[in-house]
Amino acid sequence: MSTHVEKLLVLQERDRKISRLSREIKDLPARQKMIDSRLDQQRKAVSESEDLLRKATLRQKEMDAEINEWKEKIKKLREQQMTCKNNDDYKAIERQIFSYQKEIKSVEEKQIALMEANEDAVAERDRRAEALATEEKVVSQELAMLKDRVANIEKQIADLQAERDKVAAEIEPEWLSRYQRIFERRHDFAIVPVNNGTCGGCHMKLPPQVSVDARRLDTMTSCSYCGRLLYIIP
């Protein structure tokens, strides 16, 4: 096999590995974003639970204030009742007091229902907080693994690039330039074998003369359709 083709195949193998690893590094930020998104969802769930509890506490205080207001009104009516001159006035105030007491009872019933709901809300908040703590540990481990992976990939790329540069330096400029233009355009294979008269890249049937030319390993032969360099192993 021609040394040109041989070296180009070695170069292509390095370039494809570098390309694959570079794509993986490029995809890592998206993976990190997905991991962070999971954590954000857990944090949002905890925040929502805490917000509900804060609102419930505020509503509880509002109800206490409402009850105290009704009780203050009843107290004043009791004082007013003590000064009544006739029975009708006394009974009218009594009816008003009874009405206020019903309001108090209604609010107290709502308070009980709210307290029961709060117990469930606290349990849900604690459950979500526990899930968040677990997720934080998992995310921390995953991010550490991603960081290690990035360092490992960068080292692999650096080593491959050094090997690639060494091989490229041994290839004639005309062959190297042609190969690099094709590889940059195709992003996969720049030099491919001829298989049963078809191009190993685009798999199109080649003209007979092109197949014949591909056997001349000292001459650059290109596919008539995709432009990739061709070779045939004797």
Image (cartoon, grey):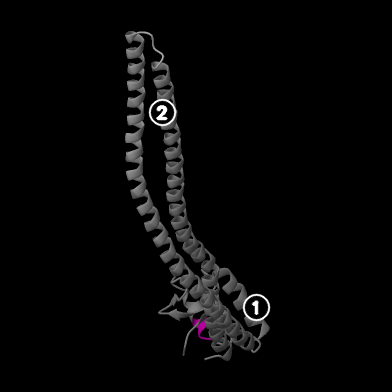
Residue visible at 48% across and 85% down in the picture: 232
Callout 1 amino acid: Ser
**Whether residue 123 is situated above or below residue 142 in the rendered picture:** above
Q: Is residue 139 visible?
A: yes
- State the residue in front, 151 or 205: 151
- Circle 2 residue: 71
Percent x, y of residue 106: 33, 30
Q: Could you tell me which secondary element the residue under label 1 belongs to?
A: helix
The stretch of residues the image draws in magenta is: 212-216
Image location of residue 104, percent across then percent down:
36, 29
Residue 229 in sight in this render: no
Between 212 and 19, the residue placed more toward the observer is 19
Magenta span: predominant SS is helix
The Cα–Cα distance between marks 1 and 2, rounded to whole angstroms, is 94 Å
Placement of 228 over or under 92, stated as above or below: below
Q: Is residue 163 left or right of residue 65?
A: right
